[in-house]
Structures are given as structure tokens and as C-alpha cells.
Image: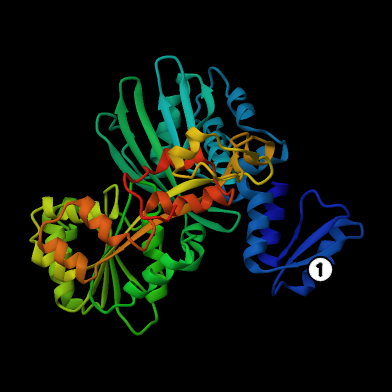
């Protein structure tokens, strides 16, 4: 209760103690109520130093210091006792009804602790998997799954039931997959958690995707593109009509790139609309429509009727079938700009994919403006990365000359990065701009290799673009080789 009172005071008045500071330091939010300073002095009963913070910095301090209290008071109590996840599991009684009681029910405290811990570790997903003899809980951090807990399978059913209640799913339905979502507040940060359940041999597994609006809505300049790619991408999205595609595997940051592009285009003078399944993040000033396939609200059907709303720019969440692709390209023919994503391994592969869907070559050539392919590589932890001289075999795999005498870097492992050797991720990009030469190749039904040779004579492909991170020591050679394939031909960029 004491932690809840402190959190409410800090949130309302704008004063909060900074944890672990000597001398005692009080963070002051910009625009804080000055009359509350007297109450702060009375409560602390000792001298302290004041430190000014912007609203964003202050919210981050609240998230770190009071993270659990915003979810549930019982999580705050756990934080005051310095309980970790293992302690929460060990504290679950063997016979008590895990869902009985109020917010102090053990299973409720456990879920609060999981969410708080996942956010602090920067996890994008939580995977809860029941097996024959255990329950495995894993986080996806920087694109890699890490097991954080292995517990008794007996708590799987009540844990899943509680998550279903939170996300308004049918707890009695255990034979069919279900999807839902729950909105939370963690230290002043608004979080959306997408929940997906799936029946398995030993019970239902649950995947929770944590969506943090503050992390997703970044400027185009902050995505980590090299200057050449950034300037060309800004030029193509500034065109008044056509289709721009972003391609890559699941979790490669395609939606973030599209949102960043829309934020740049959102000047207030154009009507921007999005069709998404589902809407992941709210964008101010942009009309966002979630798809509902149960009632026939599909990408293609909605896109056909959207012209009546007079849009200038439309973002379609994903081109999944020939109907959606055809409607998007025809939409661009009316003088509008359409942005979307497609799952292919390369930018030139998107052209082949659209052809395979049955799109005519003349329609592709006349409407397609650019295709951006991207990947994410993990960033080496700056505190523990270790330099090493590459041998001739590694030089050959990376396309480096034998005369290369520089140092590359490998991952280490320290407390700062959780013993993984990596912290954060970097973008790797290749941008295929449809010029007159590429249009001619599309008309001629050219292969992917033929298109790539012409398109990337003066620009990097994915692997070459990622090599800048390897040579600068920001990522390891193994990480790049794991994420990107090296081109079978060289454009001289590596």
C-alpha cells in the first residue's frame, strides 16, 4: 500500500525519489506542482538534491521504480520485498486455489511479475508453453528466445485462465485457438498486449506480444538507415502516387518503418488512412481501420470502398492474396500513394511474388515505385564485446580481401546485457527503386538475379549494407551471417 501511495503522489505531483542515488536525489518533472515540495521534505525528513527531468524522462523513472504498482498493487508489494520471478513461483502454495481471492491471489501476482519483468528486460514477446513434465516461460529479446523460468505444469491451467480473463477470451473454450488483447499502464507507459492461445498436446500455449507505442513511433532518421538509402527512401515516399512495399520476415520491423514513413507524410494537408489486422499502434491525425474477417471486412473489400472517403495516402497492413494486390495497384492508378508489406526474402523477390499472384507485368511496371527489404541484427554490448583478427576463411565468407588487416568484434557476456553479449538491434536495408531500366526488365519478365544486377550496381544489397555494422564493430560477423545471405555476385560495395 505504501508503494501505491508513493506512486500516486509521484504521478500526480511530479516528484519522485531516484533509486540508488547518493546523496538522496529527488527527480522533478517539468511543470511539477511547487506546493508539493513541502510535503516531499516532510516525508523524507532529510536533505536532498533536486534534479530536473522532462516529462518523458520522468515517466521512465517511474517505470523503473514503480513498474509493478501501475499494473497491480500486489506487484508493487513484491517489488518492495525484492522478489524475483523464482520467488513468486516458489511462493505459490501446493493446495490453495490459485485463482481464489482478490488481487493477492498467487497467480495474479505471478502474471504481474511476469509482465513487469518482461518490460524491464525489453522483451517483445512472452511464450508460455506446457510440456509433459514442466511449464516453460520464454522471452523474445532482440529477436531471440530465452527461457527465463521452468515451473511445474500444474500452474499452467490457472495461469492461462487468468490471462484469458484479462483479455476477455472464453475460458471454457480449450479446443480452438483464440485471439485477444489487453491494455495496461506501466509506470505511465501505455502498453497493449496481444494474446494468442493455441491448443497443444499438454494444454494450451499462450503467446503475448507486448506493444509499446513509445518504442514503435520513431522518426525515419532514427531507424538506422545509411544516408544514401535514407535520402532515396524519403524521395520515393514523397511521390504523389504509386505503390511502395516493405518486405522482410516476421519481426523484421516492417510496421515500424511504415509508421515512421506515415509520420513523416502526416503534414495535416493530406488524408491518410490505414487498413490493419489488427491496429498495432495509435497514430494521431491518421484514420486507422482494423480488419474483421468474420463480418467480411477484409483488406481487398475495404480498399475497394475506401475511395469514397477521399484518401491521399493509404497503408495496407499486408498484401496476402492476389485480390488485395490487384486492388492496391489499381488504387495507385487513380493518383494515390499506397504503402504495404509483403513477405519475401529480398526486394526483387517482391516483384516475383506479385507476378506469381497473377498481377500483370504492365500493371506492376506502371504503379510500383520502390521496394524496401530489411532485417534486424543484434547490436553488440559495448561493455563486453571483444576484438579479434578474422582468419582467411571468415574473410572469404564476408567477402573481405585477404589483405584486410582490421579487427572485427565478437559477443562476450556481462551483467549489463544479461550474459547474451548483445543489447538492442540495428537495421539492415536494401532499397530497389523502380527506374526506367527496372520497368523494362519487369515488362520483359526478367528473373530476380537480372533485376538485382541492374538495380544494385550503385547501391548496397542487404549483406553489403549489414557489413557496415560489422566493420564498425556494432555487430558480429556471426550475427550478420545468421540474418542475411551473401550475394552470389558482387556489386563492389563490400
Residue at 44%, 44% in the rendered image:
399
Classify mark 1: residues with Cα within 10 Å, few (<14), some (14-19) or many (20+): some
- Is 16 situated left or right of 188 in this image? right
Taking depth in this image into account, of 121 and 385 the one nearest to the observer is 385
Residue 172 can be seen in this image: yes
Q: Position of residue 422 (x, y in %)?
A: 58, 41
Q: Position of residue 373 (x, y in %)?
A: 34, 55
Residue 305 can be seen in this image: no
Q: Position of residue 392 (x, y in %)?
A: 51, 35
Vertical side of 443 occupied by 126: above or below: above
Vertical side of 246 occupied by 198: above or below: above
How was this image coloured?
Answer: rainbow
- Is 42 situated left or right of 374 in this image? right
Residue at 47%, 37% in the rendered image:
144
- Is 416 situated left or right of 203 in this image? right
Taking depth in this image into account, of 422 and 70 the one nearest to the observer is 422
Q: Secondary structure at mark 1?
A: helix
Vertical side of 423 occupied by 255: above or below: below
Amino acid at each position: 500500500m505504501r508503494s501505491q501511495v508513493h506512486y500516486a503522489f509521484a504521478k500526480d505531483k511530479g516528484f519522485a525519489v531516484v533509486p540508488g542515488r547518493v546523496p538522496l536525489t529527488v527527480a522533478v518533472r517539468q511543470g511539477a506542482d511547487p506546493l508539493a515540495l513541502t510535503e516531499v521534505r516532510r516525508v523524507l525528513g532529510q536533505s536532498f538534491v533536486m534534479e530536473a527531468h522532462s516529462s518523458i524522462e520522468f515517466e521512465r523513472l517511474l517505470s523503473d521504480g514503480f513498474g509493478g504498482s501501475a499494473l497491480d498493487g500486489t506487484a508493487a508489494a513484491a517489488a518492495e520485498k525484492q522478489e524475483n520471478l523464482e520467488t513468486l513461483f516458489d511462493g505459490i502454495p501446493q493446495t490453495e486455489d490459485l485463482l481464489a481471492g482478490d488481487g493477492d491471489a498467487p497467480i495474479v501476482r505471478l502474471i504481474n511479475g511476469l509482465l513487469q519483468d518482461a518490460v524491464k528486460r525489453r522483451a517483445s514477446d512472452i511464450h508460455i508453453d506446457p510440456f509433459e513434465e514442466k511449464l516453460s516461460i520464454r522471452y523474445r529479446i532482440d529477436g531471440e528466445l530465452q527461457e527465463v523460468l521452468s515451473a511445474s505444469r500444474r500452474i499452467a491451467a490457472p495461469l492461462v485462465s487468468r490471462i484469458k480473463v484479462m483479455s476477455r477470451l472464453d475460458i471454457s473454450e480449450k479446443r480452438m485457438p483464440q485471439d485477444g488483447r489487453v491494455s495496461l499502464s506501466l509506470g505511465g507507459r501505455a502498453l497493449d498486449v496481444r494474446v494468442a492461445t493455441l491448443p497443444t498436446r499438454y494444454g494450451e500455449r499462450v503467446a503475448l506480444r507486448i506493444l509499446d507505442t513509445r518504442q514503435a513511433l520513431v522518426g525515419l532518421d532514427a531507424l538506422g538507415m545509411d544516408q544514401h538509402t535514407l535520402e532515396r527512401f524519403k524521395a520515393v515516399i514523397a511521390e504523389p502516387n504509386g505503390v511502395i512495399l516493405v518486405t522482410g520476415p516476421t519481426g523484421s520491423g516492417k510496421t515500424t518503418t511504415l509508421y515512421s514513413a506515415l509520420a513523416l507524410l502526416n503534414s495535416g494537408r493530406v488524408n491518410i488512412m490505414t487498413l490493419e489486422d489488427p491496429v498495432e499502434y495509435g497514430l494521431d491525425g491518421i484514420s486507422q481501420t482494423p480488419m474483421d474477417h468474420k463480418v467480411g471486412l477484409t483488406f481487398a473489400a475495404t480498399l475497394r470502398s475506401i475511395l469514397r472517403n477521399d484518401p491521399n495516402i493509404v497503408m495496407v497492413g499486408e498484401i496476402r492474396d492476389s485480390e488485395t494486390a490487384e486492388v492496391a495497384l489499381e488504387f495507385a492508378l487513380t493518383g494515390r500513394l499506397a504503402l504495404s508489406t509483403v513477405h519475401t526474402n529480398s526486394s526483387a523477390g517482391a516483384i516475383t511474388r506479385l507476378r506469381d499472384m497473377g498481377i500483370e507485368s504492365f500493371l506492376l511496371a506502371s504503379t510500383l515505385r520502390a521496394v524496401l527489404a530489411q532485417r534486424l541484427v543484434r547490436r553488440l554490448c559495448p561493455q563486453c564485446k571483444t576484438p579479434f583478427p578474422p582468419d582467411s576463411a571468415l574473410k572469404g565468407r564476408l567477402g573481405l580481401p585477404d589483405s584486410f588487416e582490421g579487427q572485427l568484434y565478437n559477443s562476450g557476456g556481462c551483467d549489463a546485457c544479461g550474459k547474451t553479449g548483445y543489447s538492442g538491434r540495428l537495421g539492415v536495408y536494401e532499397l530497389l527503386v523502380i527506374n526506367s531500366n527496372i520497368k523494362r526488365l519487369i515488362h520483359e519478365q526478367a528473373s530476380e538475379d537480372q533485376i538485382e544486377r541492374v538495380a544494385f550496381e550503385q547501391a548496397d544489397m542487404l549483406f553489403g549494407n549489414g557489413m557496415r555494422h560489422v566493420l564498425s564493430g556494432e555487430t558480429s560477423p556471426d550475427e550478420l551471417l545468421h540474418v542475411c545471405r551473401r550475394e552470389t555476385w558482387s556489386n563492389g560495395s563490400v
